[in-house]
Image (tube, helix red, strand yellow):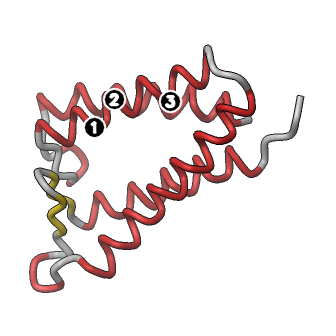
Amino acid sequence: MAKTVCKILGVVFLLVGVAGFAAPNLLGAHLTPPHNVVHIVSGVVALYFGFAGSLSGAKGFCLIFGLVYLALGLVGLVRGDAADNRMLQLGPLMLGMADHGVHLLLGAAFLAGGLFTRKA
């Protein structure tokens, strides 16, 4: 399951990363150029694990990436500026409520991909 999750979400990351340059407010997210680059790099890494990586590598990637994205979504909800729609700035990245929600969903999907992967 981890390899499938990496393939599907890798494509999603690439598409969002490229689309973010043309539509920086896609679905209410704050897709700045640095944010788009993060999505493109994440998509490439996910696709590597989905197509060329080992099953255990894909599983590990899903678990780690899932935890990181869940944490990012939770930190945004907890530490984001309550007066400014929970806006959180992490270096050059500006993350708002839409970003936090998407990060929580992606984190859960990647984590599920890692947790529900059985040994070959």
- Is 66 above or below relative to 78? above
* Front in this rendered view, residue 42 or 25: 42
The quadrant in which the N terminus is found is top right
Q: Quadrant of the C terminus?
A: top right
- Up-down relation of residue 26 to residue 102 (above or below): above
Please report the residue visible at 66 percent of the width from the left and 32 percent of the height from the top: 57
Seen in the image, is 54 located left or right of residue 96? Answer: right
Identify the residue shown where x is 58% and y is 47%: 110
**Which class describes the residues within 10 Å of circle 1: few (<14), some (14-19), or many (20+)?**
some
Question: Which amino acid, mark 1?
Answer: Val
Q: Badge 3 is on which residue?
A: 46
Picture quadrant of residue 90: bottom left
Q: CA distance from mark 1 to mark 2?
A: 5 Å
Which residue is the site of mark 1?
38
Residue 35 spot, x, y in % from top left: 20, 42
Q: Amino acid at mark 3?
A: Ala
